[in-house]
Amino acid sequence: MVKFIFSQMANLLSSGIIANREIPKKYVVPPGKRHAQAGFIEIPIIDLQDQKNSTQNILKASQDLGLFQVINHGIPSKLMNDAMKVFKEVFDLPPEERSKINMKEDLNQVCRIYTSSYNYDSEEFHFWRDVLRHTCNPLVECIKFWPQKPENYREIVGEYVVALKDMGKKILEQITQGLGLEKGYFASELTEDNILTINHYPICPDPSVTIGLPRHKDPTLINIVQAAPVNVPGLQLFKDGQWFGFETAPNAFLVFVGNQLEVVSNGKMKAVVHRVVTNASKARTTAVFFMSPTMDCIVEPAKAIVEAQDCGPLYKAFRYKEYFDIHTGHDGDRDTILESYNFKIKQSSIP
C-alpha cells in the first residue's frame, strides 16, 4: 500500500509530469468517452433565508435537475476565500512537504493526496485531476492528521468543515420537511460519514482527449460543492440526452443530490449525472463536502414516503458498504450502479 500511495504522489499532475505539452498516453481517453459539445443551463438559486419558499424550491430543483445552488447560507465569504487559498497552496508545496500528508498505510487513511482515483493502477485511463482527501468525523481526531502547511491550514479548514456540516444539516432538515418525514430523520447514521475532497484540475494542453471526471452519480446522500470561479468552467450535468455547462452565482454553494437520497426518497429526488471537463487556459480547484451514511447503515426508502405514494418501495434495502464497494471498485461510468437495487428496472430487464 505504501508503494501504491507514493507512486501516485510521484505522478501528481501538479508536480509537473507533463513534458513538451504532450498528454501522457495513460491520460488519453478513448474516443467514445471524450466530452462532446455542451449546451448551457441555469441552475436554480435558492435563498436559504427565504424560509417561506426555500423548502419547496429545493424539492422542485432536486426533482427536476438533482442539483441546486444556495445563497445566504451563513458561511462568510472570507472563510470561503481563505479555505480555497490554502487548498491551492497545498498543491504548490514542495514534494517533500506533500509527502508528509501520506504517512499511513491503509486506503482509508485520514488524509492523503493522490492523482486520478483509487483505482489508479488498474483503471483503463487516468482522470486529469489531483486529489486531496480529508476524513472529517470525528473532527477532533481527524484534524490531527491533516496538513500542517500552509500556515493555519488546520485552523481554517477545520472552521470551514464545521460550517459546511451545519449548512448541510439545515438543507437536509428542509428536505425532511418537504418529504413529509419526521423532524431529525437525517440526523442519524445516514449522514455521519463526512469527507472533504479537494479536486485540482491543472491546465490541460489538449482538453479534447482528456477528462477531469467521467460521467457518474455520487454515492452519497448529498454533496456540497464550492466550485471554481464562474470564468473557469468545467462541471457539466446530463439531462434529456444532452450535456450542459452552467455557472455558479458569486459566494454560492452547489448542492448535488446523491444516490442514497434518491433511495430514501423512493425516487422522488433524483441523483444528477455529471462530469468534469478540462481546461486549456486555467487550472480549477473545487472543494466537495460529502455527507454519507456510515458503512454499516442500512439504506432503504423511508416508510412514510412509501406509504404516502402507495406504490411500494422502488429500491431494496442494502448495507451502504455493499454499495460503496461496488462504486469505488467500478472502473468506468458510475451512473447506472443504482439500477441493480431498483425493483422495477431489474424486473423490466428480465427476458
Image: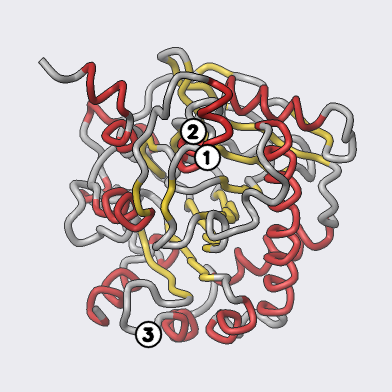
Quadrant location, the C terminus? top left
User: At x 26% / y 34%, what residue is drawn?
Assistant: 340
Q: Nearer the viewer, mark 1 or mark 3?
A: 1
**Can residue 277 be seen at all in this image of the molecule?**
no
In front: 100, or 263?
263
Q: Residue 43 appears in which quarter of the rendering?
A: top right
Circle 2: residue type: Ala
Position of 295 with respect to 55 (left or right) is left
Above or below for 126 versus 112 = above
Q: Nearer the viewer, mark 2 or mark 3?
A: 2
Q: Residue beneath label 3, please?
A: 104
Q: Earlier in the sequence, mark 2 or mark 3?
A: 3
Relative image position of residue 240 (x, y in whole percent): 45, 13
Q: Nearer the viewer, mark 2 or mark 1?
A: 1
Relative image position of residue 225 (x, y in whole percent): 62, 48
In front: 129, or 188?
188
Count every numbered label the image shows and give the total. 3
- Secondary structure beneath disc 2? loop
Q: Residue 78 appears in which quarter of the rendering?
A: bottom right
Relative image position of residue 302 (x, y in whole percent): 53, 38
Q: Please rate how many residues cluster around mark 3, counting C-alpha atoms within 10 Å: few if below 14, some from 14 to 19, many from 20.
A: some
- Secondary structure beneath disc 1? helix
User: At x 79% / y 45%, what residue is drawn?
Assistant: 251
User: At x 38% / y 22%, what residue is drawn?
Assistant: 36
| Tags 2 and 1 touching, CB below 8 Å | yes
Q: Residue furthest left?
A: 351
Q: Please rate how many residues cluster around mark 2, counting C-alpha atoms within 10 Å: few if below 14, some from 14 to 19, many from 20.
A: many
In the rendered structure, find residue 108 and report the number of the disc placed on it. none
In the rendered structure, find residue 271 and report the number of the disc placed on it. 2
Q: Residue 55 appears in which quarter of the rendering?
A: top right
Q: Please rate how many residues cluster around mark 1, counting C-alpha atoms within 10 Å: few if below 14, some from 14 to 19, many from 20.
A: many
